[in-house]
Image (cartoon, rainbow, N blue to C red):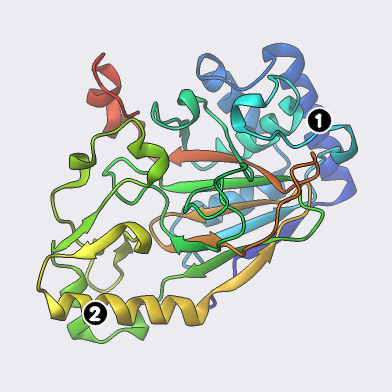
Amino acid sequence: MTSEPGTLTLTTAEQTELDALAAEAVDRFGSPAEPVLRRLTVLADVLPRRVREFLAEFRHDDPRGGVVVRGLPVDAPRLPPTPGHWRDRKDGGSAHADFLLALLACRLGDLFAWRTLQEGRLLTDVLPVAGEEDVQTGHGSEAPLEFHCEDAFHELRCDYLGLLCLRNPRRVATTFAAFDPALLSAEDLRTLAEPVFHIRPDSEHRKWMDEETAAEPVPVLFGHPQSPYLRLDPPFMRPRDGDRRAAAALGRLLEQLAARLCDVVLAPGDVLFVDNYRAVHGRRPFRPRYDGTDRWLRRALVTRDLRRSSAVRADPLSHTI
């Protein structure tokens, strides 16, 4: 099984169709937000046929773990400068690109947001923030972002992660690896399926969320034993105290993924969708300039089943979804 994501490169005709759809969405709705999601789903039904087929194939348990759609009509020169902080982003400045991301994401499931992440915005920013160069979040830069599953600490984490590139002049690579259980021993697979691993929220979530949220140990592998899913965030996890067998199995899993890690360089208009149950992602280090030209991605979280979070979303005291 290959570890590289599949790729679809759009034709000029498909780019024209998508440009018109995004422009229509901007005119009708302004910017993507929860109240317009149902209507966006309808609009996504008229995406170019080849795009719909490509994403449908990916959604139906594609073992590659990720796909890239290249050439979305993002007009990079007309975008505002890369913000110095996500709070500085002006609403509407990236609306056309945001709708492109949202329309494609709607073909995989339902978009959702964390109340603990960037004030609950439906689409969020991945960009360098001054003073956070070494953090293990989307705001870091000079330290490599270690490969991980998105929001692995939480049961309601996304099924798919979408990353749309708005700006990347220095060709900073996103790292990606699909998980292949065939590369692990039967003993390691059984060990990693035991609920003996603690995963904490990352530093962004921990600003608002009690770390005890993830106090209960969980398995790294789950689902069918012959084709398990993955739950992993190395910087924020550890096996239970004294469990050397679990620590050794986890180490071998990390070695396997590191050996398969590939670089995915996204250009403006390229979007990477990661199956958050089958693959890991990260980022190579770079030195930011903080002059409005830095790498800037827009991020979407997608769930295949929004009903799983219905109780949490209905709770006025909830600080999560």
| Residue 16: assigned label | none
Quadrant in the rendering for residue 176? bottom right
Where residue 252 appears, as percent x and y from the top left, is 32, 82
Q: Is residue 1 in view?
A: no
Q: Position of residue 303 (x, y in %)?
A: 41, 39
What amino acid type should be assigned to the residue bearing mark 1?
A: Pro
How many other residues sit within 10 Å of disc 1, few (<14), some (14-19) or many (≥20)? some
Residue positioned most to the left: 242
Q: Quick one: quadrant of the C terminus?
A: top left
Location of residue 300 by image quarter: top right
| Secondary structure of the residue carrying numbered label 1 | loop
Q: Which residue is mark 1?
A: 80
Please determine whether, in this image, residue 293 is positioned above or below residue 174. above
Q: Is residue 41 left or right of residue 312?
A: right
Q: Residue at x 62, y 50 (%)?
A: 53
The amino acid type of the residue labelled 2 equals Ala
Quadrant of the rendered structure where residue 225 is? bottom left
